[in-house]
Amino acid sequence: MARAGDIGTMAAWLLAACAVSSPVVEVRGQPLDREVESLVAQSKLGPVRVGICVVDTASGRVLAEHNARDSFMPASNMKLLTSGAAVLVLSPDFEFRTTLFMDNGRLVIKGAGDPALADPVLLEQMHMGVDGLVRALVDGVSAKGVREVREVIVDDRVFDRDYIHPSWPKEQLNQWYCAEVSGLNFHTNILSVFASPATRPGSTPSIRTEPSADWIELTNKSQTVSTGSTSIWLAREAAANRFTVFGSVRAALDKPVEVTMHEPALVFGRLVADRLGAAGFRNTDGTSPRARLADEKDEFPTAAQAETLAVVRTPLNVVLERCNVSSHNLYAESLIKRLGHEATGQPGSWANGAAVLRMQLNAKLGPDTDGGGSTVVADGSGLSRENRVTPLLLAQWLRAMHADKATKDALLESMPVAGEEGTLKKRFRGKKLGHEVRAKSGFINGVQCLSGYVVDHDTDRCVAFSVLINDITPKTPFGKAKELHESVVATIDKWLTRTSRSAAEPATSRNDSEGTASPDGKKPRTAASPARR
């Protein structure tokens, strides 16, 4: 739990920062509501729980709902709450800044909780590897005229050192999506392992890692084979960087196998110290620099006082996009911990980050939107099965973010376009959508969710939706949950087409309260998807 002093700090901060909440207006019995109920009835999902809420973003009017006030596990739809709160608390122009400076012969690397530092995907886009990044930082130190470095200290105290959430699945902690969360994240806190076969079957394949260092302990129990397929996997000892490679290798891997690292901040510090030593930097006794994590006794100059050598900056929009388009859990968890740090000035944690997120929900939506206090914030990514939200809260949150000019674009543009990118690239095939759909999918065992927006760029009308499905079992027909997601969205899309046309026609031509298709039956022209940042 957050300390009492932390809560007091957050409360004072919230009074200065929060927006006035908007009322929830519900209208039942409209055509879209009936259509959505019919889709649920026809879905053939069996004894699963389905919750749906559809909201007009301009008015806040609930257009359709089904169990909208019931509580559900949101899976990765939780990222929409976390990333939205980050836009509100940090501001759309925020940058994560990892800073290197000298302090009495010590090279200090001050972390900001940036999840993007040496992210393999982003490095590839920059045509750079891990070693290239570390070398560039060391070259920056040398260019400033530094000749002696006694030790490298990594100050990761912007976050606490509870690296793993206690409710994450223990049997999956070696998987990339369960990576440790640190005040200095590095290489998305995973070790990438590349394997190539030996010349003779039965021999040991060659293994290389990224990052690479001789102090990373790796035992290779894999074997070269001449038949079958390449299939390797790794195990890591708990709270250590000792890895074992298992499996068979027939051909070189196109993509690496990934396993989580322990204490990534220290791994980064040791890599920097190694590179400094290789570049000729020495301690006063002639030895290579050592690396360690900062402790409670360490005090360093402020940013204004320090002799800054290098700063690695990551804009918030880059973090939001990796969080929502790629659905990267580390990005969401770094955001929720950074919320806690920003509000309290204390190390960010899941406890104080969750408290800030709940405050933002209440400030934006009012205390009654979550169905009587049923919202549970356990982590930022939705990996925890302890999270609980209602479809009404998610849809109204999206509405509130879209209605606020300061936050509208930042959240909307962080979400993948259906059928085009990220986790939605292969979705909505066969669905002829007349408008742009930006949404966030979510999946953990027994849970499939989809929440987002349907946007008419011609009229600037927008509908927010949330479809949460829980209690899916192996007996649930495969693909039926996703089919219901997409059918609901396609129905919203058609409704938006009808109402947009109706609004453009004379009142005498309308057949009902929502309007009908125009006589020529043609689809309205829609704007092309705006370019991604």
Image (cartoon, grey):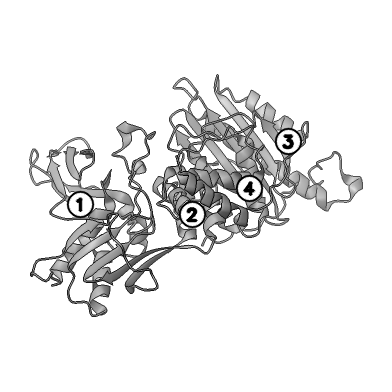
The x, y position of residue 75, in whole percent, is 48, 36
Labels in figure, total: 4
Please tell me which residue lies in front, 149 or 45.
149
Mark yes or no: residue 416 visible: no
Mark 1: few/some/many CA within 10 Å (<14, 14-19, 20+):
some
Which residue matches tag 3? Answer: 32
- State the image coordinates of residue 275 (x, y, percent, origin top left): 18, 65
Q: How far apart are marks 1 and 2 (CA)?
A: 28 Å
Identified at 68% across, 28% down, the residue is 37
Q: Say what secondary structure mark 3 lies in.
A: helix
Task: Using the image as rendered, state which of residue 417 and residue 274 is in the foreground.
Answer: 274
Position of residue 64 measured from the top left corner of the image (x, y, whole percent): 70, 35
**Residue at image mark 4:** 363
Amino acid on which the number 3 mark rests in the picture: Leu
Q: Is residue 205 left or right of residue 451?
A: left
Q: How crowded is mark 2: few (under 14 residues within 10 Å), some or many (20 or more)?
A: many
Residue that mark 2 sits on? 320
Q: Which of pointers 4 and 2 indicates the residue nearer the eye?
A: 4
Q: Name which quarter of the figure residue 36 lies in.
A: top right
Residue at disc 1, secondary structure: strand
Q: Mark 2 or mark 3: which is in front?
A: 2
N-terminal of the pair, mark 4 or mark 2, is 2
Screen quadrant of the N terminus: top left
